[in-house]
């Protein structure tokens, strides 16, 4: 790179704008992803706020901040798999069964709130 002064000059000139654009694009992507997950959860009948609220009532306190990643995978058999702390894989068929999904997620939510 030291042999390319024109490239160095271009990087110096545009680096801050590139960082700003990247941060904005990342934020926008995260907001779209969260909105899509919320829509999917409502569409499939999982009421995430209600699940958390139930745990708060049982524990007699507000939930602590937590992260629970739910990733939908395109597999035929309905199911859900805890792959790491706070990281769950689920099939689309599993999420469509509200009773099974809430029964699976309730203890996970209880553990993290």
Image (cartoon, grey):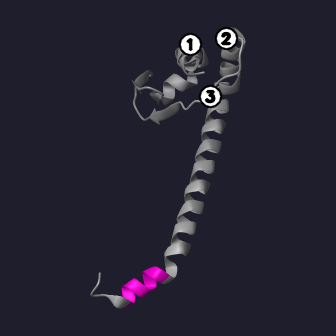
Q: Nearer the viewer, residue 92 or 28?
A: 28
Quadrant in which residue 89 is drawn: top left
Location of residue 41 in the rendering, given as x and y in whole percent from the top left corner: 63, 31
* Residue pointed to by mark 1: 103
Q: Are marks 1 and 2 in contact (CB under 8 Å)?
A: no
Residue furthest left in the image: 3
Locate residue 89 relative to residue 33 in the image: left or right: left
Question: Magenta span has 73?
Answer: no
* Residue pointed to by mark 2: 59
The first of marks 3 and 2 along the sequence is 3
Q: Are marks 3 and 2 in contact (CB under 8 Å)?
A: no
Pair 1/3: label in front: 1
The first of marks 1 and 2 along the sequence is 2
Residue lying at 52% horizontally and 67% vertically, measured from the top left: 19
Residue lying at 66% horizontally and 15% vertically, measured from the top left: 55
Looking at the image, is 55 positioned above or below residue 66? Answer: above
Q: Nearer the viewer, residue 88 or 94?
A: 88
Please state, as top left, top right, bottom left or bottom right, where the C terminus lies in the image: top right
* Residue pointed to by mark 3: 44
Please state, as top left, top right, bottom left or bottom right, where the N terminus lies in the image: bottom left
Q: Which residues are magenta?
A: 6-12
């Amino acid at each position: 790179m030291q042999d390319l002064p024109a490239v160095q000059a271009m990087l110096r000139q545009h680096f801050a704008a590139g960082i700003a654009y990247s941060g904005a694009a990342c934020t926008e992507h995260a907001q779209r992803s969260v909105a899509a997950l919320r829509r999917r959860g409502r569409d499939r009948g999982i009421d995430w706020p209600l699940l958390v609220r139930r745990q708060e009532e049982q524990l007699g306190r507000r939930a602590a901040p937590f992260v629970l990643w739910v990733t939908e995978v395109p597999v035929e058999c309905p199911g859900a798999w805890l792959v790491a702390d706070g990281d769950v894989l689920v099939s689309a068929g599993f999420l469509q069964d509200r009773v099974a999904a809430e029964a699976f997620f309730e203890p996970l939510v209880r553990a993290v709130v």
